[in-house]
Amino acid sequence: MAFESSTPLYDCLIIGGGIAGLSSALSLVRTLHTAVVFDEGIHRNDQAPHLATVPTWDSQDPKRFRDAAKLNILSKYSTVEFANVKLEKVAQLTDGPHKGYFCVWDTKQRQWLGRKVILAMGVDDLLPTIDGFAECWTKGIFHCLVHRGYEERGSASGGVLAIDGDASFFAARHLAFQARNLTDNVVIYTHGNDELAQEVESQLGPCGFRAESRRIEKLVQHPERAQMEVHFEDGQSETVGFIVHRPRTSIRGPFAEQLGVEMTPEGHIKTQFPFNETTVSGVFVAGDAGSQFKIGTQAVVMGAFAAGGVQMQVNAEKWSKPLNSVFNKALGKPFLTKVFGHDYVVLPSKYFDDIKRASPQSLSFFQALSDGLNMEASVGHLYASTTEIDVVVKHLNPRLTQLTPLLCDEAEYAIEKEVGALPDWKKFNVSNLIAAIVHRTTNRILVGKELCRNEEYLAITTKFSRSLFISGIFWNFVRLGPLRKLVAWLTIGLHLRDRNAAAKVLLPHVLARRQEKESGVDVATKYPDALQWTIDTAPSFPGDDEPLHQVYHMLHLTFAASSASGVGVTQCLLNVLAYPEYLEPLREEISAVVARHGGWTDKALSQMALLDSFIRETMRLHPAGSLTVARTIMDDHFRFHDGLTLPKGTNIIAPALAIHYDPDNYEDAHRFDGFRFARYRQKQGESHRWLASTIDQKFLQ
């Protein structure tokens, strides 16, 4: 089926015009989203005499409800349409200008295009093949006593047909207990299942229930009264007031299969909480097709939540990329915006080479960070020093190969400490859990094994990092002008308390190591960590060689290492949960590579192409900050390659998220593709270019 480029585009295509579809439509139009509701006029409750449990519509005709809901929507809202057609096919477009969108075709080959799809077409009941069952369905045989039981109260008897999905003791007991509220005489028909009948008789017989194991030949509905004759294969029969049976169901139409959504073992479409998105991104489900609880009120709720998921995704795709696409990319010019209360000039990517070539003395990251978090109030001019850069560039990075086993060892210890053995499921706040594990692990190479397992030190440095950020940015959002620094000085007390408490623990270790060094101990070999490298680094600013300043440098390195890393690992974990299809191939690759190299070595990590790609793609769509590469101009003036000149004190920054979402930089840029960069490495060579650790003009961190 060809796609016509002139086809109008809607925010959502809603397949199904029953309760769930109507609920979805009403939720979408309330936020001015466009939608089409496709209704072929067939609904599961067409044979039901009335609705139940829907406030103000209880005991009323389902068709009247649908007509009234449709009239209400059309009379008030203008962004939804109803198409009374029979659809034949739905597909996600794989090429062209609307790649990733969805298209539906009806039996006359008319087509509609949508950003998202809600499957609300419901299910078909797979009725048992017992003669007469279909004729009795909804008249004397009911699928749910919440819907139909009230009207049968006081019946002389009631029955449970315990076959197919209800052919278990627990299902039969559940339905029998419900029926007992309506009648004193309840019989469980097992239709030839002697074993189940015996279990029912032994367990429920003493409670007044009866089991009947004879096979049923046919069912006959009384033409006037709500009762049936049950005819057995042995020629005998009995009368029962009503029967409850929950038939198996099948998803209506070919659409779930055409889209490739995953199904549950119970036969409904697998969904993700809370918005009922299927395993296919952009496809949601509402109503009976996505739930074991096939009831009208559930359909209303699922429809509203599915619409909420559509709204969030459509809004994100429409409005999450204005900085790059609307401003600096379209105009090719810098523009001014607020970042944590400070004025920043946002630069397009053509200026990135200028930033890369500039020295820290001309464009200072640390000055931008110090100003942004008002650090002068707590550590003075500590960030005028290059000590922390020297520690990372000259000592940490060259030793990453040797440090990998230490990180592996500490990560295992941290997970055991924070998670432990779990014989049962346990709930964690994912952000707090990952932050704690990352904090422990990074401190192994920052301060060594002794301190990184010191619970007091871990707790106080966690508090230090938290209060550093909160107290640092709080006053940025208040218009204090030149008084901001003074106010920051006067209100820094809480953070100073945390800083001093952390310094009290760390300072003795600094003093002890300095003394060991003076006495001739080979401290470089004994302490392969950032604390020792800080002590050994030549001073770049007055005071750098003072023990307390070295303590402050270490505390701020701890803040930097834990914060960004924690966010990244947390987002990776969330993406594994959001896209479970990646879990098995990632596990297989990790297991094979670790086994081949005898553990988590640097060489092993370099051969985990899928894992590295998954991390880089996570960082692309969910960077630690939507704006990055912050710098403050330290020269009197800084001149860029095209003549743009900015004065001293100007803050500059790059729109990382906008660049990452730019379709000129990445195909299908808004979609998470965990193995995108693994394919790039195979097809385009230059494998180093696509590593998660490689930064370039199209990938910023």
Image: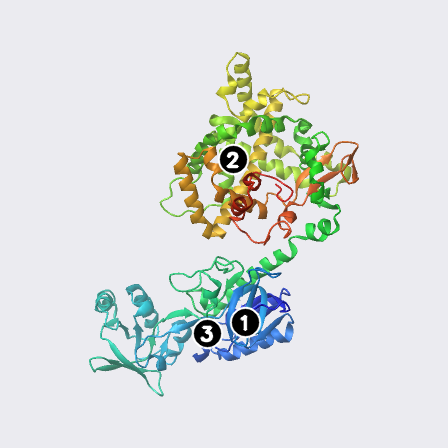
Dot 3: what SS? loop
**Residue that appears at 62% across and 39% down:** 470
Residue labelled with disc 3 = 52
Between the C-alphas of marks 3 and 1, the distance is 34 Å
**Residue that appears at 73% across and 37% down:** 484
The amino acid pointed to by label 2 is His
Residue labelled with disc 1 = 105
Is residue 17 found left or right of 191 in the rendered image? right
Dot 2: what SS? helix
The extreme top residue here reads: 519
Of labels 3 and 1, the one closer to you = 1
Q: How is the image coloured?
A: rainbow
Give percent across and percent down for residue 652.
72, 40
Give percent across and percent down for residue 111.
57, 71
Between the C-alphas of marks 3 and 2, the distance is 54 Å
**Quadrant of residue 192 in the image?**
bottom left
Between the C-alphas of marks 1 and 2, the distance is 54 Å
Depth order, front residue of 698/181:
698
**Disc 1 or 2, which lies upstream in sequence?**
1
